[in-house]
Image (tube, rainbow, N blue to C red):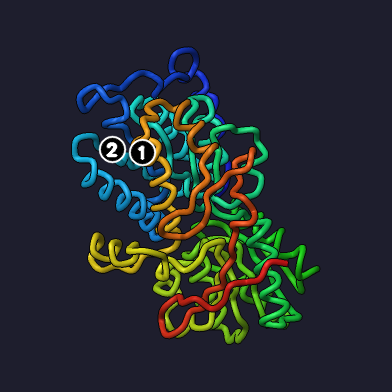
Amino acid sequence: MRQKLSRVFGGIAIAALVFGGAACQAGEDDGEDGGGNAACGQKIAFFGPLTGDAAGLGIHIRNGAKLAIDQYNKENADCTAELAEFDSQGDPAKAPALATQAVGDQKVIAVVGPAFSGESEVADPIFQSGNLPTITPSATRPSLSTKGWSVFHRGVGNDTSQGPAAGRYIKDVLKAEKVYVVDDQSAYGAGLVDEVKKVIGTPIGEDRVQVKQTNFSAVVTKVKNSGATALFFGGYYTEAGLLLKQLKGAGWTGTMIAGDGVKDANFIAVAGQAVAEGTITTCPCAPATAAKGTFVSDYKAAFDDAEPGTYADVSYDLTKIVLEGLKDGKATRADMLSWIKAYNKAGPATGVTYKFESNGELDPTQVVIWAFKVRAGKLVPDQEIAKA
C-alpha cells in the first residue's frame, strides 16, 4: 500500500547524511538489559498509519504486533520486548523522518512494516542504511523487492498475484465485459490497476483521482456514460467509499471491485451500508476472523471484543518471528536479519509457512488470494481465488 512520492526524496538525502559512519551500526551494540542478556529490552517497531484517513488499516496491523509482544512478555517476564510505534499516517512525506528516528534508536531490532508501498519506497532505503530488518505484512507493490534492499521482506503475496486474481474474478465470476478502471495515483493503487489490466485487457475506460479528493463528479459522469457494469478501483477505502457513494447517487448500478486497501470496515462507513452492499475486495490474505489456534479469541479479549481486521493475523505471525529470534538470543540487527532470512516455519495464526526468497518475497507456494464481499454491512469471505 500507499502513496505519492512527491516531496520526500529530500528527506532521504538528509537521512543519508545522518547515517554516515557509526550511525549505520545502530542497534549493533550489546544493549544489555535483564541481567546481562542483550536480547532483553529490545524493541520491535510498528511502522504505519495509526491516525489519518488510513488508520483503520494500520490499527489492526499494530494490534496484531502488540498482541504477540504482550503474550511474549507474559511468558518471559524476566526478559521482555517492547513495541515502538511510528505513526506514518500512510504518508510518504512523513516516512523518512520516522525511519531516521527508528534507525537511530539502537534498541529497535526489527520493523513490522512499513504498512504501505509509497512509504516503503522512501523509508526502506533508510532502513537499509541502518541494517534494520523489515517484514511488511501489507505493502504489496512488486517493485519493492527489486531494489536490492537486503533488509526487505514481505509476508504476503505482491500485486503480481493480487492484481491478476482480481482480474480473474472480474472475468470468471462477475463475467463483466465492460470494466472501467480508476486509480488514486499512489504507488499501490496505480500498480494494482496495471496488473488487473493485464488480465481483463483494455478497459472500457480509465481515469485517475487523487488521495484526499472528495468530489468525483467528473469521474462519475465518465463511468456512467461508458456503460460500464463493473469498476475496479486501485486505492484506499476513503476515496473508494466516496466515489462509490457518488456513483450510486447518480444512478450507476454496477459493481465496484477493489484491492486490499479498501478491505476495511471504514469503507462501509464512508460509502454507507446500502451503497457498499455487494462491493468486492481482494486480499493476498485469508480471512483473519477464521485464523488458526486461539488468535481470534485472544485478539477479541485484548481489544474490547473487536474482530481482527485485515492483516492483523499476518502482523501477529511476523512479529512472532522476531520474538522467536530474541528468545534464541539474536540481539543485534545483523543476527536478527540472518535469523529472518533463514526462517522456515508455519505461523500459528495464518498457517502460512514463512520462508523468504533471496529478494525478500514470500515463497510463492504460500501465497493465497481471497475475495471478500460486503453483505449486510460487513465484509465477509466470498471465496479463495484459484491460482492461474
Q: Secondary structure at mark 2?
A: loop
Residue 150 located left or right of residue 224: left
Q: Are marks 1 and 2 in contact (CB under 8 Å)?
A: yes
Report the residue at 53% width, 45% height from top.
Answer: 344
For the residues marked 1 and 2, what is the alpha-carbon distance in whole angstroms? 7 Å
Q: Is residue 69 left or right of residue 6?
A: left
Q: Position of residue 67 (x, y in %)?
A: 30, 53
Tell me the mark number nearer the camera, choosing from 1 and 2. 2
User: Where residue 347 sits: x, y (%)?
Assistant: 45, 54
Q: Quadrant of residue 179?
A: bottom right
- Dot 1: element: strand
Which residue is disc 1 drawn over?
Answer: 44
Checking the image for residue 81, the label placed there is: 2
Residue at x 72% of width, y 83% of height: 175
Does residue 380 show up? yes
Which comes before the other along the chain, label 1 or label 2?
A: 1
Q: Is residue 157 above or below residue 370?
A: above
Residue 276 appears left or right of 109: right
